[in-house]
Image (tube, rainbow, N blue to C red):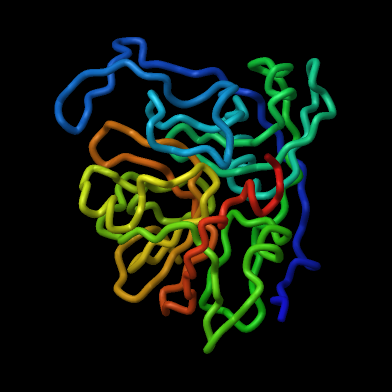
Amino acid sequence: MPLTTNADHLVKLSVMGQVTPPRYDTRSPYRISHEGAPRVLPGTGGIAYNVRIGDRVRGLVGDHVEPAVSAKNPDETANGGFNVLTCVGNEAIIASGEARGARGVVTGKHGGAEHVMIDFASDVLERLLVGDQILVKGFGTGLAIDGFPDVLCTNLDPTVLDRWVTEERNGKLVVPVARCAPAAVMGSGLGRDHVFRGDYDITLFDPGVVAEYGLDELRFGDFVAILDADASYGRHYYRGAVSVGIVVHGDSIIAGHGPGVTGLLTSRSGRIEPVLDPAANLADLLGVR
């Protein structure tokens, strides 16, 4: 039975960003690994021509790599609106430059960098330039599922929810996820007072946990359940809670960092039942590859 939501009452607003360049600290390009080794690696920002949702996260020679296009509004306040009101699955339209009119889809948000990641077809990526303007039709903020008042929806386009979560069982939402991860390995992003922008990271430094949960198989765009984690009013450990998000950026060598997860659903009372499905990925769900 399809879920019913308040989608008909939500407001759709235009928000704007632009393709942002990669940036490095002016003092040093080095990143210090959790083992104390300095490395220089590609990182956040820019146009990733050969990294898109659906691709494997591990194995890339990079740190916090953002798939496809990284976008930001140069005005700090406007960028706040761009980050808060943009939702995963929203339509994005290039509004300037050679690729004007091309359409893509929002795939996540990266805290700290305060970027919004957007997937476009490979031929569109080739025509984009840093600084090109992107319009996003922000839709999904305030989304709620009828009968599940203790499940908070954040950063989620109603169309994605409709295609992704279609069943309830024994009073719980049945949510397909590619992988689960224990709250114990969650790092950067903990402690924020809300989850309407940004992400938090799955650290992959314990090989036993990585093997146990199959985390070396993570893909950009995977839906992932974080077990014993609540994000109702900020991310924290809470036994029995379940949070579900989407993998939005790549792995990291830095202590406390790893593949980033933008929150989509959370239930402190545990009214989310994650069900493993290797195809639980935004690229598969929307057929964008």
Q: Residue furthest right?
A: 101
Toward which corner of the image does residue 97 lie, by quadrant?
top right
- Residue 265, placed above or below residue 127: below
Position of 76 with respect to 40 (left or right) is right
The answer to whether residue 229 shows anywhere in this view is yes
Position of 195 with respect to 118 (left or right) is left
Q: Position of residue 46 (x, y in %)?
A: 56, 21
Position of 177 with respect to 253 (left or right) is right
The answer to whether residue 72 shows anywhere in this view is no
Q: Residue furthest bottom?
A: 170
Q: Position of residue 115 (x, y in %)?
A: 54, 34
Q: Residue furthest left?
A: 36
- Residue 66, placed above or below residue 106: above
Toward which corner of the image does residue 77 lie, by quadrant?
top right
Which residue is located at x 74 percent, y 24 percent? 124
Residue placed most toward the observer, 39 or 280:
280
Q: Position of residue 129 (x, y in %)?
A: 68, 15
Assign the C terminus to one quadrant of the image.
Answer: top right
Which residue is located at x 66 percent, y 17 percent? 131
- Residue 185, placed above or below residue 237: above
Position of 69 with respect to 269 (left or right) is right
Assign the N terminus to one quadrant of the image.
Answer: bottom right
Which residue is located at x 26 percent, y 42 percent? 256
Toward which corner of the image does residue 216 lie, by quadrant?
top left
Q: Residue furthest top?
A: 27
